[in-house]
Image (cartoon, grey):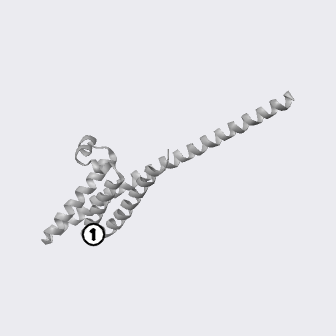
Amino acid sequence: TSDTYARTVDRAAAESLGAQIATHAAASAKDSTVAFGHQVQRSNLLLNGVLLVVAGFLGLWSAFTLRLQDAIISIYVLLFGALLIFFKLGINKEVIQTYFGFIHSGTGQLLMLVVAGNLAWFTGWVGIVVAIFTNINGALTWYNARTESVEPS
């Protein structure tokens, strides 16, 4: 009977160890998936910033045809793109945190990307492509931020 008891205890310990290993493996897989998601999101926002700067710069050419309203909108698009690049690369962290703290939340990023994306519509044909990408990226960024804050740790 003591032999049977020892086998039962060993089996229970092995099952417990197996459950712990499976839980750890699942947590590690989730952590690596989340890390990959953050890396993709970071590169998407960085790419979005570069595209906004390009669209803004190309839209500045409208100043030569005396369409000053389009040129001013292009400056705003360029500045939103530069802000996004500085945020994602960590340039001037203190200034961005102080004056643009909203960009650190999913909702703040959504609002900034929607405003920048909808301004980009008016910067020419490149702006239309950038606007579509920016609005989709804003929605995805907001969705990712919402799902991460809802998931239990």
Q: Nearer the viewer, residue 58 or 94?
A: 94
Above or below residue 88? Residue 143 is: below
Residue reaching furthest top?
2
Q: Residue at x 31, y 54 (%)?
A: 108
Looking at the picture, how far across and down is residue 61, in whole percent? 19, 67
**Mark 1: amino acid:** Trp
Q: Residue at x 74, y 36 (%)?
A: 12
Secondary structure beneath label 1: loop
Is 106 left, or right, of 80 in this rendering? right
Looking at the picture, how far across and down is residue 127, in whole percent? 29, 67
Q: Nearer the viewer, residue 152 or 104?
A: 152
Q: Residue at x 50, y 47 (%)?
A: 152
Reading the image, the residue beneath label 1 is 121
Above or below residue 116? Residue 13 is: above
Looking at the picture, how far across and down is residue 38, in whole percent? 44, 49
Looking at the picture, how far across and down is residue 1, in whole percent? 87, 29
Q: Residue at x 77, y 36 (%)?
A: 11
